[in-house]
């Protein structure tokens, strides 16, 4: 199962790095300048940054694990971006 969301921000690269480095001491993480991947037990979150947004792509084997992975990545992103007054992300199934 797969879902995607976007977070509009001029700080996308900063949040990409912050999220990936946060999880790197707990789970396998890959990070490059514009992309990252966090491999949780429940699923995988892919992140891609450009000048205007951070794109998120979550995959998991079951509905419950997909929702859990979305929740983990979204809650951390919104916590790091609290100054932007971010609202809950809108996830779309692919």
Image (spheres, helix red, strand yellow):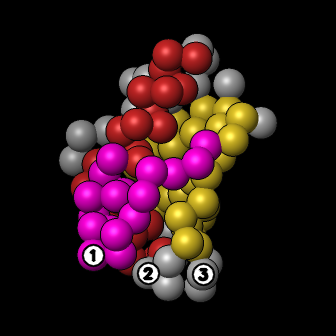
Name the residue: 27% across, 75% down: 83
Residue at mark 2:
11
User: For the magenta stretch, what is the residue range?
Assistant: 75-91
Nearest the camera: 27 or 4?
A: 4
Nearest the camera: 79 or 29?
A: 79
Residue at mark 3:
52
Quadrant containing the C terminus in the rendered view: top right
Taking 63 as reference, is 14 left or right? left
Label 2 – label 1 distance at C-alpha = 11 Å
Taking 79 as reference, is 74 left or right? right
Q: Which circle's residue, 1 or 3, is located before the other in the chain?
A: 3
- Secondary structure of the residue carrying tag 1 is helix
Q: Which circle's residue, 2 or 1, is located before the other in the chain?
A: 2
Residue 45, disc: none
| Residue 90 magenta-highlighted | yes
Residue 54 pos. (x, y %): 55, 67
Is residue 85 depicted above or below 39 in this figure? below
Residue 51 pos. (x, y %): 59, 85
Depth-wise, is mark 1 or mark 3 nearer the camera?
Answer: 1
Depth-wise, is mark 2 or mark 1 nearer the camera?
Answer: 1
Nearest the camera: 89 or 23?
A: 89
Label 2 – label 3 distance at C-alpha = 8 Å
Taking 66 as reference, is 88 left or right? left
- Please state the total of marks drawn on the protein image: 3
- Secondary structure of the residue carrying tag 3 is loop
Residue 59 pos. (x, y %): 61, 33
Q: Quadrant of residue 72?
A: top left
Name the residue: 54% across, 57% down: 47
Q: In this view of the protein, can residue 46 be seen by the observer? A: no
- Secondary structure of the residue carrying tag 2 is loop
């Amino acid at each position: 199962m797969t879902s995607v969301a976007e977070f509009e921000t001029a700080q996308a690269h900063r949040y990409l790095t912050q999220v990936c480095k946060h999880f790197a001491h707990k789970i396998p993480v890959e990070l490059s300048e514009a992309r990252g991947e966090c491999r949780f037990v429940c699923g995988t979150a892919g992140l891609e940054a450009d000048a205007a947004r951070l794109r998120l792509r979550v995959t998991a084997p079951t509905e419950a694990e997909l929702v859990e992975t979305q929740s983990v990545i979204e809650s951390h992103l919104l916590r790091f971006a609290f100054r932007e007054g971010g609202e809950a992300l809108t996830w779309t199934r692919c």
